[in-house]
Amino acid sequence: MNSVNGAMLRKMFNSGLCTLDKNKDYIDSLNVFPVPDGDTGINMFLTMKSVLKEVEMTQGTELGSIATAVSKGGLKGARGNSGVILSQILKGMMSELSSSTRAVTTKQFARAIENGAKVAYSAVSVPKEGTMLTVIRVMGEDAKKIAKSESNFISFFEKLLVAGETILAQTPEMLPVLKKAGVVDSGGRGILVIFGGFHAALVGSEDVKFDFSKDGSLDMDSSAGHGVAALEDLGDIEFAYCTEFNVTHMFKATTMASIDGLRNKLEQLGDSVVCVGDLDMIKVHVHTNSPGEAITAALMLGEMINLKIDNMIQQNREFLASQNVEEKEQGLIAVAAGEGLSNLFKEMGTDFVIKGGQTMNPSAENIALAADRVNARNVFVFPNNKNIILAARHAQDLSRKNLIIIPTTSIQEGLAAVVAFADESTIEENTQNFNEAAANVRSGSVTYAVRNTKLDRFTIREGEILGIDQKGVVACGASIGDVTMKLIAKLARQDSANITVFYGEGVKEKDANELHDRLIKKYPEAEVSMIHGGQPVYYYLISVE
């Protein structure tokens, strides 16, 4: 095989997503910190899933159209640092491939990989070697060398994967933190898993059709805030009815060509068309003014289940009625996981709280859609997680509003910043106040180790409790309460006036109260607050000011 056309590129991304789906948990396990919040694999998977959704909605097999869909899907679905970097790699690659309408050679594909690395590097303010950036850069350099002697794509990919594994094995030597943890870079492993899927499609050794109908992975398509759950952009509605259903128990005459015919029919009836599946089940989504016609067309193929039709005009009417106020100058949205934390942000005046955080990073599109629903011209975004900041910045290109990103790296910083908001202040004044308030917070968290490792001068055993500050592990032991006390001792200073502890979904109120009593005795001069956060993963989140 000496060239790749649009049809093969579609298969390669299908196979890449399938392979990533099988390996995402392993990629998550390569997290440097041995805590249960590794999310590189799931972020890359959900980003690739968005890519494939966009590809599946693209009619035909013209290479340029497929390449454009890959770029668009990556931007919309980018989640977490790894997902954003992956989306930029794909953007650079596809900009090189989109100029070819029929097929590309190994030399063109090699240039695409090299360009993907360049675009990804430019998207990161301070690129760090020993990460997925290094892996894709070296793969791009090696790809150009390999393509000089290999015109066959299968041989080209075989040698490219060997080159990728070689540089991945060197990442612990570039980043001491990887070497201490005994792992290679998780994002780099993710890149090789995806490229391994591409190779599998080329040799035809994998089932290259991702089954969206059976996929139970996390979809971040909702927001908690002011009673509004769905984040549909209902600004100018051309097609009124959001129609969804599955088709199963296919008739004997139904073929894969019949599914393509149904997709074509749906595209004539409306937009936002998803029509994916096989002869076992088809999943359909369409925005249309003729839901009856869509249903009739589908019933020609088999039986219908899980039918849902929403009137988006009525939804918009109800939303506008609830927002019957003049557009304000400034609004706030924040990312948080846990009912208690979400409610706290809303009580402090946050317009929308996007459900997410560790292991549940919202995409750039999720953030943009949330911002567009805020009744304000300018919207401040509090990511509250270092792994969400990049996606928030990319949301600036997707939103109709002016987004100002406050780079909060923890829930504690986000809450402190929101408290500093003043309606009468200018955007510049509030931005300064937010950043100063966040900088004054010393944050910590308590969780458990998911594997044995050596880190930050600690020999850590699986299941042990870890106390983590903003730099790394500072306490380790068998008791949640004791480790928490040690962590707070590291965070507190003589002049610390406030110690706030948010307890998570796995902590009993009795245990939280006992910790509260211990803190009052040890820090009699400080105001100690114990608040139910309900957050997953972490027993306690601590804020000291």
Image (spheres, helix red, strand yellow):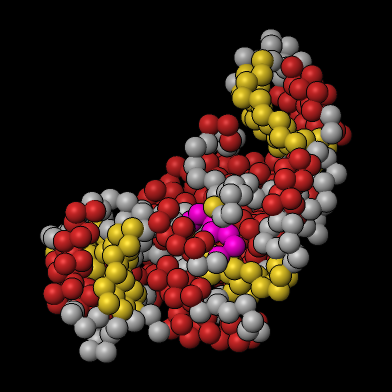
Count of number-bearing discs: 0
In the image, is residue 353 part of the stretch drawn in magenta? yes
Q: Is residue 434 magenta?
A: no
Q: Is residue 20 left or right of residue 527?
A: right
Q: Residue furthest top?
A: 252
Q: Is residue 481 visible?
A: yes
Q: Quadrant of the N terminus?
A: top right
Q: Going by the image, does 83 lie left or right of 4? A: left
Q: In the image shown, does 12 or 226 lie closer to the viewer?
A: 226
For image coordinates 38% across by 80% down, the residue present is 441
Q: State the residue at coordinates (66%, 84%).
A: 426
Question: Which portion, as a residue range, is magenta?
Answer: 350-356
Q: Is residue 178 above or below residue 449?
A: below
Which corner quadrant holds the C terminus?
bottom left
What residue sits 58% from the left and 31% below the top? 213
Q: Could you tell me residue 425's position as x and y percent?
A: 63, 84
Name the residue furthest bottom.
495
Q: Where in the figure is residue 536, as x and y percent of width and height?
A: 36, 53
Q: Can residue 50 be seen at all in this image of the molecule? A: no
